[in-house]
């Protein structure tokens, strides 16, 4: 809503504000931190808070600790997205609230009204959305679509996947929403594709993208999602399980409580 911000102009542009909010997806990941998201540009008596800020993983490199301590001490309220991040900040001397990803603050109607149809899809399909270049999911997806007699359609970071998956040539965020909403099932390794499947009540299976022992692991966010919505049976470690679709009624019941907490914060 302001003029376009750059590192040189953001301080001046933000001077009239009374509150600045930092949030949410991995903005505080210490492996990729930009101090702007720690509000290093703020001057004067401005209220600094965060909403559902994610630190990505569960470790803090030694060389980053002083940056976080110096920056966060001027925040009047801190909210993070994962309990792992809350524990990490607690170890640095900060208390933080725990709140849901902001995509979960909107219900399905907000997303459906902006979704844009992909016109060349005529049959039942699995929407495949894969963000890493490994192919550990390939055989499982191929077997699943064959068994269920549906087409594999989607997007992959691995170009080789288009040998067995139909590529969506024109897909922005609006088409992405439509594909999730209209698929028979979503097969993905994406955190937000999982969230939107929940919101739009589309059956899903989510492949874990990271080695749990890796410093770069981001599995904490799916673990947090499971603690809220009990999706563990739909997280794929090796094989896609042969089970009934997820019960979205329990998702909606829990979500209403979590939204209330978020709105109060």
Image (cartoon, rainbow, N blue to C red):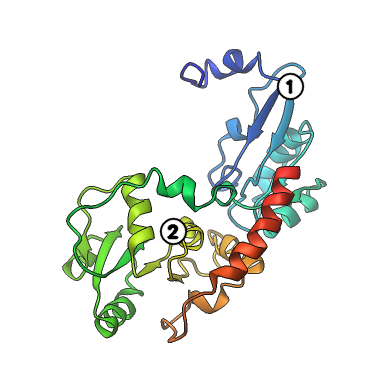
**Residue identified by numbered label 2:** 193
Please identify the quadrant where the C terminus is shown.
top right
Q: Quadrant of residue 63?
A: top right
Image point (68%, 39%), residue name: 50
* Above or below: residue 161 compared with residue 46: below
Q: Position of residue 260 (x, y in %)?
A: 71, 50
Q: Position of residue 249 (x, y in %)?
A: 58, 69
Q: Could you tell me which secondary element the residue under label 1 belongs to? A: loop
Q: Earlier in the sequence, mark 2 or mark 1?
A: 1
| Viewer-proximal residue among 127 and 164 | 127
**Residue identified by numbered label 1:** 46
Task: Name the side, left or right, on which 149 lies relative to 200.
Answer: left
Work out how far the residue at label 2 is from the one at label 1, CA to CA, in angstroms: 35 Å
Residue 265 in view in this figure: no
Q: Position of residue 142 (x, y in %)?
A: 27, 78
| Viewer-proximal residue among 70 and 222 | 222
* Above or below: residue 129 compared with residue 77: below
Figure label count = 2
* Above or below: residue 9 compared with residue 133: above
Q: Could you tell me which secondary element the residue under label 2 belongs to? A: helix
């Amino acid at each position: 809503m302001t003029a376009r911000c750059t590192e040189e102009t953001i301080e001046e542009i933000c001077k009239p504000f009374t509150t600045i909010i930092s949030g949410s997806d991995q903005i505080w990941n210490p492996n990729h931190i930009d101090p702007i998201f720690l509000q290093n540009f703020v001057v004067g008596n401005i209220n600094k808070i965060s909403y559902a800020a994610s630190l990505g993983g569960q470790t803090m490199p030694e060389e980053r600790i002083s940056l976080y301590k110096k920056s966060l001490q001027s925040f009047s309220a801190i909210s993070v997205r994962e309990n792992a991040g809350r524990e990490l900040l607690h170890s640095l001397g900060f208390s933080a609230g725990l709140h849901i990803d902001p995509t979960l603050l909107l219900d399905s109607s907000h997303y459906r009204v902006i979704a844009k149809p992909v016109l060349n899809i005529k049959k039942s399909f699995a929407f495949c959305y894969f963000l890493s270049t490994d192919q550990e999911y390939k055989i499982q997806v191929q077997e699943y679509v064959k068994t269920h007699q549906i087409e594999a359609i989607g997007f992959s970071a691995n170009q080789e996947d288009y040998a067995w998956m139909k590529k969506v040539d024109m897909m922005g965020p609006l088409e992405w929403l439509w594909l999730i909403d209209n698929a028979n099932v979503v097969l993905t390794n994406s955190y937000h594709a999982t969230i939107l499947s929940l919101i739009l009540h589309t059956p899903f299976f989510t492949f874990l993208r990271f080695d749990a022992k890796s410093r770069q692991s981001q599995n904490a966010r799916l673990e947090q999602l499971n603690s809220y919505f009990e999706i563990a049976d739909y997280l794929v470690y090796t094989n896609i399980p042969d089970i009934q679709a997820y019960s979205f009624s329990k998702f909606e019941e829990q979500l209403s409580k979590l939204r209330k907490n978020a709105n109060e914060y």
